[in-house]
Image (cartoon, coloured by chain):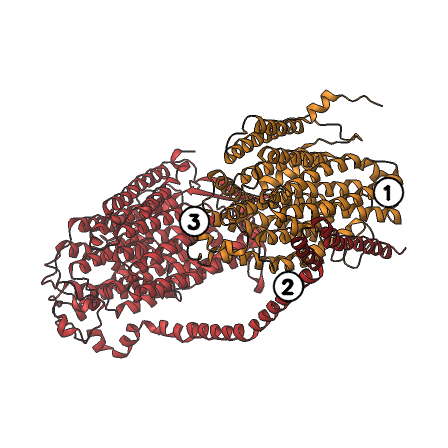
Chain colours: A red, B orange
Amino acid sequence: MPWIAQYLWLIPVLPLAAAAIIAICRQRRRRLAASLAIGSMAVSFLLAVAALALTLHPRTSEAVWRETFSFSWFEFGATALQLGWVLDPLSACMTVMVTLVSLLIFIFSVGYMQPDENFTRFFGFLSLFAAAMLGLVIANSLLLLFIGWELVGLASYLLIGFWYHKPSAAAAAKKAFITTRIGDLGFLLGMVWWYASSGTLLFYDGGNGCLEASALNLLTAQTTFGGMAVSTAISLLIFCGAMGKSGQVPLHVWLPDAMEGPTPVSALIHAATMVAAGVFLVARVYPLLDANPAQLAGISTALKVIAWVGVITAVFAACIAVAQTDIKRILAYSTISQLGYMMLGIGVGGVAVGMFHLLTHAFFKALLFLGAGSVIHGCQEEQDIRRLGGLKPYMPITFATYAIGMMALAGVPVFFSGFWSKDEILHQAMAWPVSRVPFYLGLIGAFLTAFYMTRQVCYVFGGAYRGGHRDNAAQNLKSKTSEEPSQPPQKHPHESPWVMTAPLIVLAVGALLLGFLGTPVWPWFHDYFNGRHSGVDFSRLREAWPVMAIATLFVVAGLGLGWRFYGGKRIVRAEQADPLEAFLPGVFAVLRRKFLVDEGYEATVIRGNAFAAAAMNWLDRHVWETGVLAIGYLTLGLSWASRLFDDYVVNLGFDTGCDRVRKSAKLLSSVQNGQIQSYLRIVAVALALLVLLLAWGGGL
Amino acid sequence: MNTVNYLGLLRLLAPETVLTITGLIVLFFDAGVMRRQSIPRRQQVAAFLLSAGAMLAIGWSRHYSLADPNSTSMLVIDPLTQLMKQVILFLTIFTALVSLESKFTPHVGEYFALLALATLGMMFLVSSVDLLMLFVSLELTSLSLYILTAFQKDKLESSEAALKYFLLGGVSAAFLLFGMSWVYGLTGETNLIRIAGQLRDRATDPVLLAAMVMMLIGLGFKIAAAPFHLWAPDVYQGAPTPSAALIASGSKVAGFFVLARMTLAGLAGAEGSGVWNGFAPGWVPVLAVLAVLSMTLGNLAAIAQTRVKRLLAYSAIAHAGYMLPALMAHNTMGTIALLYYVTTYALTMVGAFGVVAVVEQQTGSDAYDAFTGLSRRSPALAVCLLVFLLSLAGLPPFAGFFAKFYVFTAAASASTRSLGLLWLVILALAMSVVSLYYYLQLLKQAFAVDPPAGAKIIRPLPATLFTLVFLALLVLLLGALPHLLVNKLQAALVVSGL
């Protein structure tokens, strides 16, 4: 076994150790904390690159190259619970992506979090998060994956609520934790069921793993309620977990609120890596999802569900993004939408398609979020796009990189990575034998994406700077920053320091170049995932160009329409109504209020929960408590009775005896006269009774 | 008639020999060399000598040659007896270390020598398979313990307790001996294995039943099962705390082991049955009666106590009640459960008495009030107390939890007939809930109540504190990894065939 496959565990353990050391550091040791976090992440990145290099090695067989390492954690009865890690194309490229993006965001955070007094704690949490995410990625056991999964959820909770003194941040953290927990329940049930059915949670174990043929055949052969195959039921349960973490409809509500966390956190967790964990999970258990009972040919139910949920999420979130005004919330909804695309990609085209979009998206979404962070940092923590504007001359680097990110996200043809990965998804969706609807919805989503990104860029960078008039606008606009009036007003926005812009540039290069790994002409990424050799072949362009052309058409339409509404000098004042609002007021209002999903949950789930809690409270107070009190009093009564018995029946003789001992100091005689006799009498009675009992029972 | 090879016997009994010599050395060294030193100094030296001797005995007991398993001799030496002897020796060491704290006597040498002698009796008790040998070793143990109870000569309570212990113990020994003589009359044998062979087909002989009840009374006294428990509260209360610790731990281990040997090997043909609706005369129903009485009486009476040593006494009675069902299960699993339970219980009890000894020495009382605010006055001691009491209450992750778990599982699965011993298990579970109440009462005093104004900080000796922390960790370890002990017991049990 190659050394890197054996020591793969170092990749998550290094950041974990860093997190542990930072946790015991004092608050003042800022430099130490930051260098520990960044240093450990850099080493992990190098290790991940080494692992990736190993998987790139040319190989002879056609099968997917895979190295696993397992050990037994603990034993119960005859079985042992095994954990382990796996090195294959999926985990290799995920570790490289996670470590690289984390590294860049850590560096960015040094600048962004400089004013914060809890700088040290921030880096501790970031390291913990990265460690958990990396553990999740390299896991060869569903259990280890689940441990990482939950730790990631914890880190996310801690980081969303990092500014816990803000009530909105604390509420958002709680919401994220509880919402994802609903999905996790499904995941846990699925995991338990899977273990009960297949007897192992190791993914790959030389033919005995739960993702390998023998176990899958076992699962597809059994059916459960409604004639559903067990494999399908488990798949759907596990997909519940993925829906929660990746913000698929209807569990998406936490993700926009999670933007209450510091912006690097939004970039790292809620855009690039953690929310991708759901997609990664789906990719990891793809053999299970794909497994179909022998009698049913074609596409498995689970994959159909995933594709539909994905595409609905993609369009749904894109619609909402059109009407938002918070720079980070727009990006959050776009993240949800893009996660929907990834799910769609996996559903219709397999692991490589979805993962390719995941990787390109990680780069340009991290870029966009860090760009947004740079904007916020430069404009006195202002997040409302209506009060930004005209930043192009003030922040040239941020603008250039942001534009690259925006075009990559929108899918502008040829030079931007998002184009290639999204095109691949659309291509596969068109060829989907089940239905063409996802393809059409996907096109609409692409159009909307281009539209809202144009809107955002026009608002933020175009026109004139609309900030600094806060006093006039304050009564009309709710501003988060109005809580911090102590900050000295600053006349002009300013460009961020190099420690923040350098990561932007690196990410922008990634957002530009990464797409060329998966073009139709040279589909290297897909061949790498499927263990095939890859070559350049221009003839493939012939069948690919119609979809590319249609997609381009929709993107250009979105960009054009966006420019038509928001471009040039159309937005002059912050209080001005949104141009689209003037055009379609009813629709815009619904979109601004996010399709009323939160209100719907408020009216049904939360209200119902409160009612149930009240009912339980009533029951507890009036029904159960009576019973408990009755038992309590009964026990007390019995113990008093026993004590009385002990005091007055057993000990009375003894106490009298003792009194006499003290009075007359005739110890021996009093003991003789006192309790010993009664003690012995009890023994004698016991002897007689026991013998009688035996004799009576024996029928003598 | 084979001639006795005394040299071979000495080799087999090397641990016992070592301990005897240790006892004598302690006595002479203290009387001869240390006479002019201060009492704490003498205690340290004596405890050190005794511990060293016991460690030597433990080391020796690991190397032995197995005696002929079919022999009808007086003693049996096999992995199981050696393991139990090691347990008892460890308990003695812990008791000796806990004794350092108390200053109840100037007769240091005698005290530690008697500890050694009591231990010696227990070790022989574990090895005996012959009625005579069994009785003699029981008397050696008992007599040493009577004296240990009376050791605090300036306290009237101590003498009184010893006298009561002695009188009741004497009568119960008489019962035991009388029962034994009837058994001998019936079978003409004194060896337990042979007795079992003779008794196999006369289970319902009324004379045998009476003899059996008498022997069980004698041993029931030893393990403080109700209604033969009456001595326990007075003795635990009156005896010097370290002596009480030995009575509650080492003597308990030996007592239960010999009870198991007597019933499982000696009365193998006369179990009878104690299952619900399936009563048949034998020792199982007798033990069932004792178990029910012990659990109920011990737990309920413990609630009303206000002094910690009395509380521990009543809880000891209750624990005897929990342990008896394991014996009644009458299978390997039950025996393992019993031995695991009694071992962990004894360790916990030494620890609990150790904490009491420290508090009693420094505040002069063992009433609940003396423990008020212990967590503020000595955090380490309070945490140790917490571990011991929660283990006694049977909460995970402490050893007491697994002990109860094993016993109840063994009892519940013992019989395939109807509900088997499930009724006893249900009673035991209900009673352990009750027991949590009084343990928590004490812990509430220690943790939740503020110390009274002007209360002193309690500072245990380093050696005592180390012992207590070590015991607490041991209780935690055996609770987290019960396999460590269970696997050992299982392996030993398979070889010995008890």
What kind of residue is marked 3?
A: Ile
* Mark 1 in CB contact with mark 3 (< 8 angstroms): no
Residue A552: quadrant of the picture: bottom left
Q: For the N terminus of chain A, give its image quadrant.
A: top left
Q: Is residue A128 visible?
A: yes
Residue drawn at (74%, 45%) of the image: B219
Q: Residue B488 location in percent, x, y?
A: 62, 37
- In the image, is residue B51 above or below residue A166? above
Front residue of A178/B60: it is B60
Q: Are marks 2 and 3 on the same chain?
A: no
Rounded to the nearest angstrom, the CA distance separating label 2 from label 1 is 40 Å
Q: Are marks 1 and 3 on the same chain?
A: yes
Q: Chain of mark 1?
A: B
- In the image, is residue A687 above or below residue B201? below
What residue does disc 1 label? B182
What residue does disc 3 label? B457
Q: Earlier in the sequence, mark 1 or mark 3?
A: 1
What kind of residue is marked 2?
A: Ser
Q: For the C terminus of chain A, give its image quadrant.
A: bottom right
What residue does disc 2 label? A639
